Amino acid sequence: MSKPFRITWQIFWDWLFPPHCAACGARGAWLCAACLEALPRIVPPICPHCGEPQRSERLCRHCAQSASSLEGIRSFGLYAGPLQKAIWALKYEGLWVLVEPLSNLLAEYSRAHPLNVNLVAPVPLHKRRERRRGYNQSALLARALAERLGLPYCADLLVRCRDTPPQVGKSREERRLNMEGAFAPLHAIPEGARILLVDDVLTTGATLEACAAPLKAAGAAAVWGLTLARAALDTDRASPF
Ligand SMILES: [Zn+2]
Ligand SMILES: [Zn+2]
């Protein structure tokens, strides 16, 4: 699509479907300036491994006790307020235009807190679930983030080989068992690959761990997780409305 045509099309599209903030409904943008300002950003101190906000920079109680295949996990903000509403709208209401402002937040975070990575990949959905939803929101975010950071993007680095039952209401250990063996690499992992796995919401990290283990076993040099938000165990799927 040529640039003038794209601009004309965008003006026409905005006239047909005027942008309104996914979080507060205000006209003019899909995520308004006031809601962007009010996003519950995570600031240090955090656990240096899982990124959990806490009082010190020491490993949290959970990370101190358990082994991990990940180098670490970082999240832009808490799954609350305008961020929760925007992620909900992207995931369950098909408001894919939110990919742009939300991937900007991931890029902003990645520039402020650089991770030593050289390849971006999404946490995959099971094919059946992706067909039902029509898209994988994590893949849309990961691809846009890779573009913004100028890093290579691999859509099908991993495949989800099991459609796992929903994680809602499960304990940390039940989530880990539920996700075990759910992912496998689809291709040989490039030598020296330092992978940034992108997902929308983190709860216990069981999904990212289940992705990282087979990638490490297949030769990945490093695997980091980056999510837009992190949720408490009982709020991960609760509707924000
Ligand atoms: Zn707003
Ligand atoms: Zn931790």
Image (spheres, helix red, strand yellow):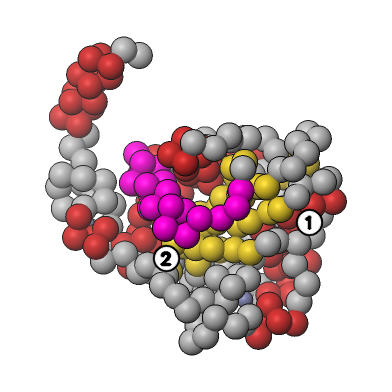
Ligand 2 neighbours mark 1 (CB distance < 8 Å)? no
* Snapshot quadrant of residue 187: top right
Q: Which residue is mark 1?
A: 213
User: 3 left or right of 47?
Assistant: left
Give, as a three-letter code, the residue at label 1: Ala
Label 2 Cα neighbours within 10 Å, binned few <14 / some 14-19 / many ≥20: many
Q: Which residues are magenta?
A: 97-117
Q: Residues within 10 Å of mark 1 (few under 14, many from 20)?
A: some
Towards the viewer: 71 or 206 = 71
Residue 29: in magenta span: no
Q: Which residue is mark 2?
A: 77
User: Residue 21: image x %, image y %?
Assistant: 23, 51
In the image, what residue occupies the spot 47% across and 41% down? 149
Q: What is the magenta segment's predominant secondary structure?
A: helix
Q: Amino acid at mark 2?
A: Gly
Q: Position of residue 71 (x, y in %)?
A: 68, 62
SS of the residue under disc 1: helix
Q: Quadrant of the C terminus?
A: bottom left
Q: Is 26 above or below relative to 6?
A: below
> How many numbered badges does the structure rendering display?
2
Residue 23 visible to the viewer = yes
Residue 105 percent coordinates (x, y)? 38, 53
Identify whether 103 is placed above or below 212. Answer: above
